[in-house]
Amino acid sequence: MAFEFKTIIEPFRIKTVEPIRQTTPAQREAAIRAAHYNVFQLRAEDVLIDLLTDSGTGAMSVYQWAGMMRGDESYAGARSFYTFQAVVQEITSFKHVIPTHQGRAAEHILTQATVTDTSIVPNNTHFDTTRANIEMRRGLALNLPIPEGHEPATLHPFKGNMDLAALARTLETQREHIPFVMITVTNNSEGGQPVSMANIRGASELCRKHGVPFLIDACRFAENAWFIKMREPGYADKTPMEIAQEMFRLADGCTMSAKKDGMANIGGFLALNDDALALRCRNALVVTEGFPTYGGLAGYDLEAIAVGLKEALDEDYLRYRIRTVEYLSERMTAAGIPTVRPAGGHALYLDAKSWLSHIPQSQYPGWALSNALFVVGGVRACEIGSVMFGLQPDGTEKFSDLELVRLAFPRRVYTQSHMDYVCEVLLYLNTVATKIRGIRIVEQPPVLRHFTAKFEPVGGVLIEA
Ligand SMILES: *Cc1c(COP(=O)(O)O)cnc(C)c1O
């Protein structure tokens, strides 16, 4: 008997609970006012459903906690390192595995060993810490996404792909300036959109032809493997592990934030095949992170990541995770709420510029929406638009192409009823959308202003009565 039930259940049961404090709209109104209308300045305790990020916010499994008790805290040569190394090598097959305290530390160590002021580093789309690390070395971080990546409403199965023709041209004309090429899976800055195996292979072949190292920013490698299984011809019968192994075999190394598909609350690594480069990176690691067998982490962190990397590849988990975002996306589309489509892997992106088209970009529609979402439903999400990117180094303002609000989903933390609640909040906001007011900046720092700037609603209220 094989009846297929429609409901995709959370593939876990709950052993420990963390209470959520219920709040009223009036309490949230007071909290956001005290936070100067900046959700980054809220106390997490005042948030009902926290969708600010999927980074380091996941719930660990009983196997991860059990692994933590086995953690070997020896300074050098700890057993936990060898357990961690074995899992990373099983998945990636890279020769050298260098633990770091999180993803950006792996990027820092890699870029300090490879990037100079004449360097150009192509990527499908650089994540902001990757870009910052390259720019700190005075190199150029070059984004080469396919054009569809920028079009919220255009459907494409692998919207995170790299523009291979543009990469070929760059390699042909700038070869001597390129220390490595990187591909980010999934493409976080373009909406958590996947990259196809064909695209990774194409980039890999171009790099090999020109003798340039090819690296993967692997933060969401398991989610990317799932999209390949679902969408790319020839992969339906392969396991996520087999697909991940094939992806990594096309590359010469990777950087990883274990706060994403490592299913851990902290950690990361750099993995490389090149002996000489690995030696330079390990030498830097000892100065800034720690001894090469722990690299800024406790032994118990290494154990949690070793278990987490495998759990992230579990099919039941991936089906549930990707479906969660897709479900919300379908409900938004049915209600006529504009989002980036198709849904990405780790987050739903609301298109605030289209949704709140009555608010001019000079009054930051995405930021206004993030405030309304919090006051109405206690949901915290993050503007990815002109507040985040608009302020130029010379102090002028340049509005972003897109004004998005990202709802990022922590791994294994929220259930279906939490998602239905989020849906209900968004559907309600749709009924009052035209009454949401714009917002203005009262005070701002010169860089990364979104974290600390102070705001005020235009006309004094967030939503007109
Ligand atoms: C989160 C992230 C990083 C940086 O990792 P941290 O652990 O936050 O330092 C790098 N690249 C991508 C694509 C990411 O999502």
Image (cartoon, rainbow, N blue to C red):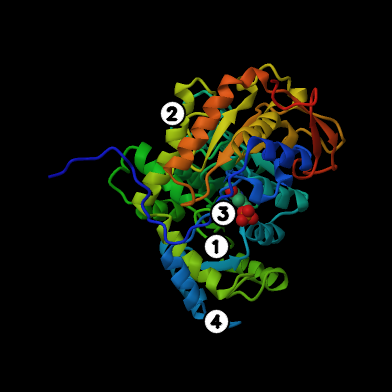
Mark 4: give few (<14), some (14-19) or many (20+) Cα within 10 Å.
some
Q: Amino acid at mark 3?
A: Thr
For image coordinates 65% across by 47% down, the residue present is 46
Examine the rendering and report whether any part of residue 181 can be seen: no
Residue located beneath label 4 in the image: 77
Q: Could you say whether the residue bearing mark 1 is in a helix, strand or loop?
A: strand
Q: Secondary structure at mark 4?
A: loop
The amino acid beneath tag 2 is Glu
**Is there CB contact under 8 Å for labels 2 and 3?**
no
Q: Earlier in the sequence, mark 2 or mark 3?
A: 3
Reading the image, the residue beneath label 1 is: 272
Identify the residue at horizontal 35%, vertical 50% (top origin).
Answer: 315
- Relative to 81, residue 316 above or below: above
| Cα gap from disc 2 to disc 4, whole angstroms | 49 Å
Tag 3 secondary structure: loop
Q: Earlier in the sequence, mark 1 or mark 2?
A: 1
Instruction: Give the class, few, some or many, for how many residues have Cα within 10 Å of label 1's Cα (few <14, many ≥20).
Output: many
Residue linked to disc 3 = 57
Q: Earlier in the sequence, mark 4 or mark 1?
A: 4
| Residue position marked by numbered label 2 in the rendering | 330
- Image-quadrant location for residue 126: top right
Q: Secondary structure at mark 2?
A: helix
Query: Disc 1 versus disc 3: distance between alpha carbons?
Result: 27 Å
Badge nearest the viewer, 2 or 4: 2
Which x, y percent locates residue 346? 51, 43
Report crowding for label 2: few under 14, some 14 to 19, many 20 or more residues within 10 A (C-alpha). Answer: some
Q: Quadrant of the C terminus?
A: top right
